[in-house]
Image (cartoon, rainbow, N blue to C red):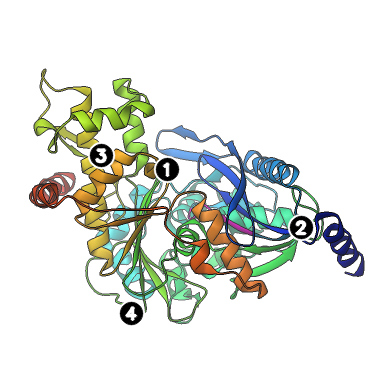
Amino acid sequence: MGARRAARALSDLRTGGSRMYVGIDVGTSMVKAAAFDPTGRQLAVASRPVGLSLHGGVVEQDMDEVYGAVVAVLGEVTERVPEAVELAGLTGQGDGVWLVDGEGRPVRPAASWMDGRAHELVDRWLSDGTFETVFRRTGSAMFPGCPGPLLAWLDSNEPKALDAAKAALYCKDMVFQRLTGAGPTTDVSDASMPFLDPRTRTYDNRVVELLGLTHRRGLLAPVSDPLATAEALGEGLPSGTRIANGPYDLPACALGAGVTAPGDGLLILGTCLASLVATTELDLTGEPAGLYISTDRPGHWLRAMPAMVGTAALDWVLSTTGVRHDEVDALLAKTPPGANGVRVLPYFAPSGERAPFVEPRLRAELTGVSLESTRGDLVRATCEGIGYAARHCLEAAGLTGALAVCGGGTRSPAWMRLLADVLGRPLRVVEGEVGARGAVLAAAERYGVGLDAAQWTRPTAVVEPDPGRAALYAEGYEEHLARLTQARARTRA
């Protein structure tokens, strides 16, 4: 420890005592590292794409590729910014199953949260009551890509992989173990789906039993509450750098957007359309959907509706129609609200939908299309459909206060105006690496480093809705709900 302190003191002399804070965000398709100064100003960002293997509903990732991307972006950021690293916060995609051995090395490819192979198990649990029982105990509405169904599927189909594994981790936990050499561990946010009791903040062994996984109970990583901390071994970050593991990307974005007061919400326009509302009330009644994410403050949760629909739906439409991303704003400006009668139910994910309801077999629908329909109609209808899905999720999550929005979709001013109109409320737009920012704030809290959270989470813009268009979209939203009800009924026929 003395040598590390001496090295830090020498670094202070070289840099004038200035420091930077590093946030690591291990996303589904992109790995990023961002450096911030003590005021929250973003100094540098490095990113690397990572691959997804998709075939027949199976979605997997190469863990070594993901970890290699983490090391690469950390090396790039620390090389570009000369300041000493005060601490690092780690976040990443949630759910899925990342099976590792005792050294944190992969036993098999990671099963992504987008994976749909366990949909038959979820169907069975929906019909026999297991699904609802789990929700009433933990506040977690299971979907095919969450750890419960995936582990049960692997237990039946690849038992040798589970036999060889030391732990079934989440993405950030694998990275934390390899960066630091610490033992397998997770945090209360990642553990929230589907095994964690949100009241005791420990695993509910009855849920493990209901899913037929009692004999695999030892694979569940110990829950570190508060966040686990350790020091970097020297890959990507200087040896001895302090790191905190978690929370995962959804609650990290809530922290990075300043969403902590009960009733306030966050909409993340990313691959996954995630709606989060801060709450101090735990209500396990009503239609089982979404989850309650435990936070670092006992008695405080995020009511989460992480829909499978998101920017991936728009990306598919853009690719299919040959529209570039930089053309979207102009098309939205030229096409009237209502998209000339074209309507999109934007449920494109191969595993169906998981919030604010669970329908593993639900698929997207395009209606009102004719030979007169334009590319702009299709693009606008898709953006409107995603907006309606967001409104549905936010209402189900209990939004009553201010709404922040972040994610890749915020780069389109026209889409932000459309979204404010569809939601009928102002949007606090928070740009930059919001998840990485939240990971740093969580790490600073864990290490007792004083940072001004209000300054770090100040919005970059506020977009107000147009009253006339908001009224039009209120009617469109009711039509969306009616069409969705019909589509859900067809999946069960």
Q: Amino acid at mark 3?
A: Cys
Q: Are marks 2 and 1 in contact (CB under 8 Å)?
A: no
In primary-sequence order, the first of circles 2 and 1 is 2
Q: Which residue is label 1 attached to? A: 408
In primary-sequence order, the first of circles 1 and 4 is 4
Which element type, helix, strand or loop, lies under badge 1?
A: helix
Where residue 192 sits in the image (x, y, percent)?
A: 46, 67
Q: Amino acid at mark 2?
A: Ala
Label 3 CA crowd tier, 10 Å (few <14, some 14–19, many 20+): many
Q: Are marks 4 and 3 in contact (CB under 8 Å)?
A: no
Label 2 CA crowd tier, 10 Å (few <14, some 14–19, many 20+): many
Q: Which residue is label 2 attached to? A: 232
Which element type, helix, strand or loop, lies under badge 4?
A: loop
Label 4 CA crowd tier, 10 Å (few <14, some 14–19, many 20+): few
Where residue 153 sits in the image (x, y, percent)?
A: 46, 51
Range of residues picked out in magenta: 89-95
Q: What residue lies at 31% left-to-right and 23% top-to-bottom?
A: 320
Which element type, helix, strand or loop, lies under badge 2?
A: loop
Query: In front of the other: label 2 or label 1?
Result: 1
Q: Which residue is label 3 attached to? A: 383
Gap between marks 4 and 3 measured at Cα: 32 Å
- Classify residue 69 by image quadrant: top right
The answer to whether residue 220 is visible is: no
Query: Which residue is nearer to you in this view: 292 or 370?
Result: 370
Q: Is 91 a magenta residue?
A: yes
Q: Which residue is label 4 attached to? A: 281
Q: Amino acid at mark 4?
A: Glu
In primary-sequence order, the first of circles 4 and 3 is 4
Q: Is 341 a magenta residue?
A: no
Q: Are marks 3 and 1 in contact (CB under 8 Å)?
A: no
